[in-house]
């Protein structure tokens, strides 16, 4: 892809970062998997049959078994800049390491190291303290005609979820993970039927659940820039709807009193909370 095409419509900083990452990842792919790249002519895209090479070696086998037939891989999981794969590479190695995971949560939320709580069982039957492409009850009426939703596909899914004890409360932390993506433009004045219908669903569910979304800056993490404002706006939109959708995590467990949302992207972290 030509640099001019890549940078069109983007700030110089975000475009430079994305271009740099494409080049860096392409060089890595060329050095490690020269016969497995070149999908659609791009050196930073693996051939679909070799998508698993985009995963860290330590999680390649377990990730495939974890996803199985119940969780969907993103269409571009073979892309070197896949946010889904980036999230897995960072967090899945911690799924069975609650002590290290507690340090990450502590640093991200600026709280003492919490006591991590199992989210679900991993593919080998052992406790996992991180869940991926997480969905809750179908409060937004997203289920298809057969009534079965697939995590990560055509329904609202948190990129990752962890649970912990802090300050006498059981809390759920929902994670939105970005690598190089740029958020889209606001809805056109003429409107967008799909988004309008979704927003109505979110609003109605929020009233039914009685959720209160509180947004606050992380200490010393946010910079005062246009991109920060954009991310902050999207955090409310993306994370708030995830908080509503996974209400079952709270409502089905009597000890869960708070749901947190955190957004990871290049150089920034933001967080918010829903109090039950």
Image (cartoon, rainbow, N blue to C red):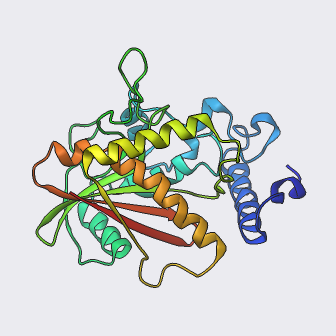
Front in this rendered view, residue 155 or 55: 155
Q: Residue furthest bottom?
A: 220
Image-based side of 78 in relation to 87, left or right: right
User: Vertically, is 210 above or below 232?
Assistant: above
User: Vertically, is 270 above or below 50?
Assistant: below
Q: Quadrant of the C terminus?
A: bottom left
Front in this rendered view, residue 102 or 64: 102
- Residue at coordinates 59% horizontally, 58% vertically from top-left? 179
Place of residue 162 in the rendered image (x, y in percent of width and height, measured from the top left): 29, 55
Front in this rendered view, residue 13 or 229: 229
> Which quadrant would residue 74 be assigned to in this image?
top right
Place of residue 271 in the rendered image (x, y in percent of width and height, measured from the top left): 40, 67
Place of residue 270 in the rendered image (x, y in percent of width and height, measured from the top left): 45, 69
- Residue at coordinates 60% horizontally, 65% vertically from top-left? 230
Instruction: Report if residue 133 is visible in the image.
Output: no
Q: Residue furthest front?
A: 190
Place of residue 261 in the rendered image (x, y in percent of width and height, measured from the top left): 37, 60
Q: How many marks?
A: 0
Instruction: Report if residue 107 is visible in the image.
Output: yes
Q: Residue furthest top?
A: 146
- Residue at coordinates 45% horizontally, 50% vertically from top-left? 88
Front in this rendered view, residue 272 or 75: 272
Image-based side of 118 in relation to 38, left or right: left
């Amino acid at each position: 892809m030509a640099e001019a095409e890549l940078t069109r419509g983007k700030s110089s900083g975000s475009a430079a970062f994305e271009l740099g990452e494409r080049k860096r990842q392409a060089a890595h792919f060329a050095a490690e998997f020269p016969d497995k790249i070149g999908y659609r002519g791009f050196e930073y895209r693996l051939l679909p049959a070799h998508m698993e090479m985009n995963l860290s070696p330590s999680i390649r086998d377990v990730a495939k078994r974890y996803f199985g037939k119940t969780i969907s891989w993103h269409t571009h999981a073979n892309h070197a800049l896949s946010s889904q794969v980036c999230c897995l590479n960072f967090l899945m190695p911690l799924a069975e390491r609650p002590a290290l995971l507690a340090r990450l949560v502590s640093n991200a939320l600026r709280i003492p190291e919490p006591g991590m709580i199992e989210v679900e069982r991993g593919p080998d039957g052992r406790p996992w303290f991180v869940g991926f492409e997480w969905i809750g009850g179908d409060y937004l009426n997203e289920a298809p005609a057969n009534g079965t939703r697939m995590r990560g596909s055509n329904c609202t899914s948190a990129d990752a979820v962890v649970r912990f004890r802090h300050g006498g409360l059981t809390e759920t932390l929902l994670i939105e993970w970005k690598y190089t993506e740029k958020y889209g433009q606001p809805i056109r004045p003429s409107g967008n039927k799909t988004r309008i219908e979704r927003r109505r669903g979110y609003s109605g569910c929020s009233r039914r659940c009685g959720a209160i979304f509180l947004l606050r800056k992380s200490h010393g993490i946010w910079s005062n820039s246009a991109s920060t404002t954009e991310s902050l706006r999207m955090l409310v939109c993306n994370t708030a709807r995830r908080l509503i959708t996974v209400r079952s995590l709270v409502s089905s467990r009597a000890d869960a009193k708070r749901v947190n949302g955190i957004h990871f992207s290049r150089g920034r972290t933001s967080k918010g909370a829903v109090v039950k």
